[in-house]
Image (cartoon, rainbow, N blue to C red):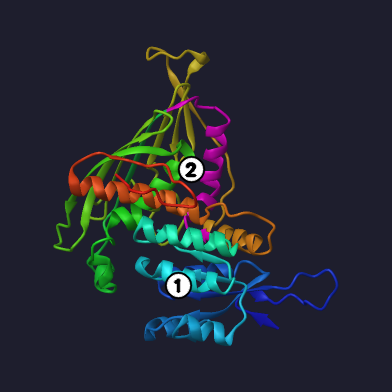
Amino acid sequence: MTGIGGPLIDAGREGVTPALSLAVCGFGLVGQRHAEAVLQVPDVEVVAAVEPSDVGRAKANAMGIACHATLDDLFANHSIDGLIVATPTHMHVEQAMVSIGRGCPVLVEKPISTSVRDADDLVMAAAAKDVPVLVGHHRRHNPLIQRSHDAITSGVIGDIRAVQATCWFYKPDQYFDIAPWRKQPGAGPVSVNLVHDIDLIRHLCGEVASVFAQASPSARGYANEDVAAAVLTLENGAIATISVSDSIVAPWSWEMTSREYPVYPQTSQSCFMIGGSHGALSIPDLRIWTHTEGQRDWWTPMSFSSLETEASDPLVNQIKHFRDVIRKDATPLVSAMEGLRTLQVIEAIQTSAATGRPVQISTIARFGVPERVG
């Protein structure tokens, strides 16, 4: 007997763990990628999907996945162990809340919500029900990032003093035409794309203390921005500069440099540079630059060494992690609180860009949101 996740494991045999049943809410491009990732995890299967559109339902049916119009229909017809929420951002909290209310663990796509206050409601609900919620910042599951994190925390480059991140690419008009919600406020590259890079800065370099940002309106006439930049002051005193655009032809973005998703053509460039008191690290080429013979001065020649790591699909790694969290063998690597903290920086960037003023990142008290951002 087989399922979408591969051969079903015989639960009747002593000592054999039964396969977990997952459902995907939202069967667009991202939902389909999650379902395809599940195919590579043998003890997990997708048993159902929630998708109202004819196109999405046809995709689910082609993969042999039962499809329902609503979450209520899903839970009425299936007993599932975990839910993956891959719908537009404004639907994340409401749909994750339904799953939490039924005691079902959730993997919700990034960003966790359109607002910090709504995300805080989700964090508190999950804590009250003791239901694990993971946020789909899947890059943390990439061995490139895990190796970078290990190198930084081991002190190879010393104390971090500066970070530079670039997220430039050109999205074709078709990208927006097939999903018009992508043209609306809150769906620009700051919330859709930069959120990944902000999460990595937090993960690799430390928490953000303050933000000063600027953004320009879409040159295509959409209701959101198409270029933005920010200066971030980290709590450890380091300064990060970051810029994003979905209307620039360039080779410097995670998609074009990491070899994470084959659909994107690859370049030999890096998109992150992290400078420390004893060396610097570029990502994703994993080169560590230092002065020769340990001399730290600008007259001494420099050389690099490359960190080694094995490649694997971070989306597959994320599903494996979700499986382990459901089975209580692991705690969430990117919890709802982590998703909220990253969203708080994104919201501060948006506030600063709108007001032209710097924004202080308030300390998150209790489970979630500060009394006021900015």
In this rendered view, identify the residue nearer to me: 284 or 107.
Answer: 107
Quadrant position of the N terminus in the picture: bottom right
Q: CA distance from mark 1 to mark 2?
A: 27 Å
> Any mark on residue 138, and which?
none
Q: Give x and y (percent) for residue 40.
A: 60, 67
> SS at mark 2?
helix
Pick out the residue farthest to the right.
14
Q: Based on the picture, tell me whether residue 141 belongs to the magenta stretch.
A: yes
Q: Quadrant of residue 117?
A: bottom left
Q: Based on the picture, tell me whether residue 328 belongs to the magenta stretch.
A: no
> Any mark on residue 95, and which?
1
In this rendered view, identify the residue nearer to me: 72 or 39.
Answer: 72
In this rendered view, identify the residue nearer to me: 279 or 19.
Answer: 19
The kind of residue tagged 2 is His
At 60% across and 77% down in the image, what residue appears?
4
Q: How many marks?
A: 2
Q: Is residue 284 visible?
A: no
Q: Give x and y (percent) for residue 224.
A: 21, 59
The stretch of residues the image draws in magenta is 134-160
At 47% across and 55% down in the image, what residue appears?
137
- Which residue does the numbered mark 2 point to in the structure image? 203
Residue 143 left/right relative to 355: right
